[in-house]
Amino acid sequence: MKWFGKGSDNVEDARGLSGGKTMLGGGIGLIIIIAGLFFGTDLTGLVSQLPLGETNQAEVKKGSNNDPELKFVSGVLESTEQIWDEEFSKMGKTYVHPKLYVFTGSTPSACGFAESAVGPFYCPADRKVYIDLSFYTELKDRFGAAGDFAQAYVVAHEVGHHVQNLLGISEKVERARSSLSKTEYNKLSVKLELQADFLAGLWANHARKLKDFEMDPGDLEEALTAANAIGDDNLQKQSSGQVVPDAFTHGTSAQRVYWFKKGFDTGDINQGDTFSSTRL
């Protein structure tokens, strides 16, 4: 893919910082993140209630357009802003832009103290997408999902969680936690994640119509390869050699591919209700 825009103003580059002061709830927050999800997650409820610590925001700088990696994710974020501005306007709502926080190693967030091993995640408490760009190397080397559109899919998926947060979907899922067994709540988590995949596909559908955006041959396949690579069944096979459906929190590879593709094919947010769909 190619992006010819100037890039988003909502990228914060914290690479090279020490991570600021550790948050009071940081360790607990990280445990919740790791225990709950591996890649792209809603962190409402318990995590968002953790007491906040301090981040040395004075040291955080806007991303430099001279940095190719940062310029790329900044462009992807800018394209999501344009798409979701329009989609929310159609719904009679105002889209509040999230921040993209780029860090190295570890960082405090309003959802806990996170490390690169957690993978990219969205924190609803501060409305930021957190990413260590080294994750893209892991995506390519460990999961065989190379290519810039696979990388764009990662950002678009996390922004999808932001959309869910703004629409109140994440909160509804979190409120249901206390009344459900772990297995039943995991099923809701899967539906939440698959919807974020759908929203990423919707972004891709509309982004290709933007004047500053250009899809290259093979881009769609890159995103589908990434979605397939990080399915729960595939991850479980890699880690333990066994597949435990009751422990799924994101959906199978086939499900993730299906819902991203459905978002891409329809471009219609009304087609993305994974919670009432008879097919997951």
Image (tube, helix red, strand yellow):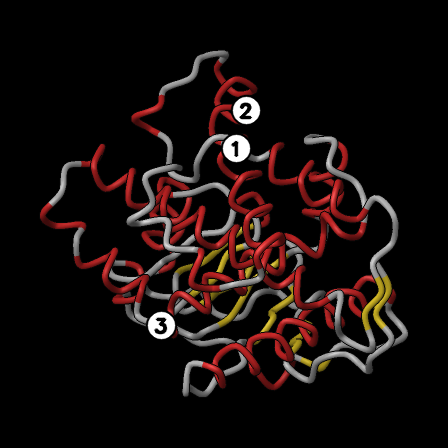
Q: Do the residues labelled 3 and 1 touch (CB within 8 Å)?
A: no
Instruction: Describe the element under mark 2 as helix, strand or loop.
Output: helix
Q: Which amino acid does label 3 sit on?
A: Leu
Q: Work out which residue is located at the far top of the displayed protein and give it.
A: 241
Which residue matches tag 3?
167
Image point 81% across, 62% down: which residue? 69
Q: Which amino acid does label 1 sit on?
A: Gly
Q: Which amino acid does label 2 sit on?
A: Asn
Q: Which of marks 3 and 1 is nearer the N terminus?
A: 3
In-image side of 175 versus 259 (left or right): left
Q: Where is residue 213 in the image (x, y as percent from the top left)?
A: 81, 70
Instruction: Describe the element under mark 1 as helix, strand or loop.
Output: loop
Image point 69% across, 84% down: which residue? 9
Instruction: Please tell me whether mark 3 or mark 1 is closer to you in this view.
Output: 3
Which residue matches tag 1?
231
Q: Where is residue 12 in the image (x, y as percent from the top left)?
A: 65, 76
Quarter holding the C terminus is: top left
Foreground: 107 or 205?
205
Q: What's the CA distance linking mark 3 and mark 1? A: 25 Å
Which residue matches tag 2?
234
Q: Do the residues labelled 2 and 1 touch (CB within 8 Å)?
A: yes
Q: Residue 110 carries which label?
A: none
Q: Which of marks 2 and 3 is nearer the N terminus?
A: 3
Instruction: Describe the element under mark 3 as helix, strand or loop.
Output: loop
Foreground: 35 or 280?
280
Q: In which quarter of the image is residue 54?
A: bottom left
Image point 38% across, 68% down: which residue? 165
